[in-house]
Amino acid sequence: MGTITIESTVLIPCGRPEVYAFCVDAQSRAAVPGQEGQVLQFQDQVPERSWTETHEGRGETMICSYVLYPVADSTRMTVTSQYVPSGLGRLFSGAKEGAHRKQEAARLAALKKAVERGVRKARNGQAQ
């Protein structure tokens, strides 16, 4: 079996610059529930528009490409995630596709919630 590709879209009720700033900040991302302790490697950054990040794990590498689109006063974030199995992980990649889809949906929901909370905190801190 080979690479598993999952494309997802989420609408975040924040501006594109705020979403981008939160998502490419390693400290902010380390505080996202379920993603604590992950070491992210950011590449191909286009400020306020797109980036790619790599998550190295045992048995697989996950490469996520993010693109941000402005939609009224919100941001549509489209993510293409590729799970690339390695070693023994290649033997089970087909069986893991459903689990990866659920994991990706949960990961993006947690990221969306963290962005909203982080932007709200930043706005409240600026207002004081």
Image: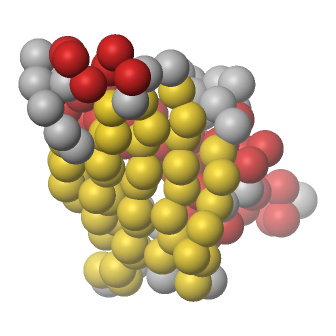
Q: Nearer the viewer, residue 60 or 31?
A: 60
Q: Looking at the image, which residue is at 32% across and 20% down?
A: 89
Q: Nearer the viewer, residue 20 or 85?
A: 85
Q: Is residue 57 left or right of residue 80?
A: right
Q: Looking at the image, which residue is at 81% across and 64% down?
A: 127
Query: Can residue 22 be seen?
Result: no
Does 47 sit above or below residue 124?
A: below
Does 38 sit above or below residue 71?
A: above
Q: Nearer the viewer, residue 95 or 37?
A: 95
* Res 87 quadrant in image: top left
Q: Looking at the image, which residue is at 32% across and 58% down?
A: 79
Query: Can residue 76 be seen?
Result: yes
On the image, the x and y values in percent for residue 116 come to 52, 50
Q: Residue furthest front?
A: 87
* Res 27 quadrant in image: top right
* Res 85 quadrant in image: top left
Image quadrant occupied by the N terminus: top left
Q: Looking at the image, which residue is at 62% across and 83% down?
A: 47
Q: Is residue 80 left or right of residue 110?
A: left
On the image, the x and y values in percent for residue 93 come to 20, 24
Q: Is residue 39 left or right of residue 127?
A: left
Q: Nearer the viewer, residue 40 or 28?
A: 40
Q: How is the image coloured?
A: secondary structure
On the image, the x and y values in percent for residue 125 come to 83, 55
Q: Is residue 21 left or right of residue 77?
A: right
On the image, the x and y values in percent for residue 107 come to 39, 34
Does 4 sit above or below residue 33?
A: below
